[in-house]
Structures are given as structure tokens and as C-alpha cells.
Amino acid sequence: MKMFSRIKLTQMMCLLLLSSRQFAAGVDIIFSPRTGVTEIYTDNFSILSPPVNFTKNGLGTTVMRPSDNVGAGIVSGSTTINQGIMELDRTNPDANGNRTLPNGTIDINSGATLRVLKSNQIGDSTTTTIDAGTLTFNASEYLATITMKNNATINGSGAFVLNGTANAGLVASGGGNAGTVSATFAMASDYTDGTTASSPRTGNGTTPITVDANTFVTISGAMTTGLESSPVGSM
């Protein structure tokens, strides 16, 4: 068994394969691809106990693509994207625990981008902060509170719903222009009924939008009553 507390990956690669590794609690993985595209796969990957934190530096693109037979993805704690692009592209992330980024926190910082290429890549109770960065939904996604500040961007051809925790919502903070939402913003979901662990919100599922003093946010995309064909709740 190999135990690590901190791993730095700085060299340019075309493929990183993590196989049959076990990580101890509190591991920090710091990945800094300089250019190009790096695909991160996992196979028979296990985590002794959380958190396993991931930091993306460097201007290159990192594609997170866990194998379908490994359960949870690489990260079980925080994900921080400081530079470049990170893409989430797991093929069959069915259960809430089998996500590319299971429940934790995501920070997308200035100039960095997180792209969700397929549905159900992020744990439903994940909280996300976008500070002058970009979150792109190219598929439908369920998650918890998103905080936007310093001209953050939520875009893409997909849709998102914030129903992963009881009080999840959109927060605009920091003063001035918090950002722009052009992806489809769904107020509720078929699963927003309080009956499942991944959708604890009860009531009508209406999503709060909180705007701090002296702050504004622009919602230019569609706002819909629900993410699926038979939505619960209303705007």
C-alpha cells in the first residue's frame, strides 16, 4: 500500500493513469500542466478517508475521467482551479457518490474555467464559488449553493438546478458586478421533494437568489420552473 500526503505533478503529459493507489486522509494533489490537454483516468482507485483535495494550476486543459468501476472520483474534498481549464467527463456517474467531483467544495478563480461535459459529474451537495472565473454547463447538473463575485460567468448549452441542500441558492456577493448567468437556470427539479438524500429540500422547491448590498448579477439565459419534464415548484 502506498501512502501519500502531498503529490505535485508539474511535467507536461498527454495521459495520467492512477491505478491501484490508496491515499491517506488530507492528501493534496497539485497538478500544473503547462500547455496542451491532459486526461486523468482512475482504475481500481480507492481513498482511505477524506479529504483528498485537488488544485489545478497551469494554463493547460485537464480532463477528469474516472473509470466507471471505481466508485467515487479522485477528489473527495476541495477542488481549486487557479488557471486554465478543467473538464468533467465521466461516462456513467449514476449514484450521487459516483461523481467525478463528489460532495465537497469547488473554487474557480480568476481566468480559470470548469466545464461540465456530461450530466451528474458533481456531487449534489457541493458548494461552488466563482471568483472572476467561468463555470460552463454543457449538460444538466444538480448541485448546491453557487456564489458569484467579481464578474463571474455561468454559461453553456446545458442547465443547472441548485437543490442539493435545504437552503441552496444563487448568491451574488462582493459589491459591483458579481457576474452573468447565461446557462439555463432551473428553479426546481423532479427530485426536489425531500425524499432522497441527494435532494433534501422540501416545500415547493423555489430557489432563493441572494444579492449583497451594492452588488448586481445579470441573468440573461432562460429561467425555467424545473429541470425535467414534470417539475416540482415554481419560480
Image: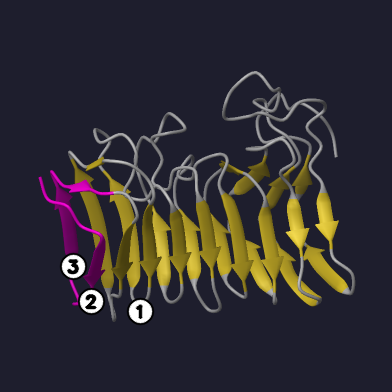
Q: Residues within 10 Å of mark 2 (few under 14, many from 20)?
A: few
**Mark 3 residue crowding within 10 angstroms, few (<14) / some (14–19) / many (20+):** few
Q: Quadrant of the C terminus?
A: top right
Q: Which residue ends up furthest to the top in the rendered image?
A: 195
Question: Disc 2 versus disc 3: distance between alpha carbons?
Answer: 12 Å
**Residue carrying label 1:** 58
Q: Quadrant of the N terminus?
A: top left
Marked residue nearer the N-terminal end (1 or 3): 3
**SS of the residue at dot 3?**
loop
Left or right: 116 in relation to 213: left
**Residue stretch rendered in magenta on the structure:** 1-24
Taking the magenta stretch, the answer to whether it contains residue 224 is no
Instruction: Report, in whole angstroms, how far the alpha carbon at label 2 lies from the one at label 1.
Output: 9 Å
Residue indicated by mark 2: 10
Image height check: is 226 above or below 10?
above
- Asked if the magenta segment contains residue 13, the reply would be yes
Residue at image coords 31%, 68%: 30
Q: Where is residue 33 in the image (x, y as percent from the top left)?
A: 28, 75
Q: Name the residue under label 3.
A: 14
Picture residue at 18% right of the left edge, 67% below the top: 14
Q: What label does residue 221 carry, if any? A: none
Q: In this view, does 190 lie above or below 102?
A: above
The answer to whether mark 2 and mark 1 are in CB contact below 8 A is: yes
- Three-letter amino acid code at the position of disc 1: Gly
Element assignment for label 1: loop
- The amino acid type of the residue labelled 2 equals Thr
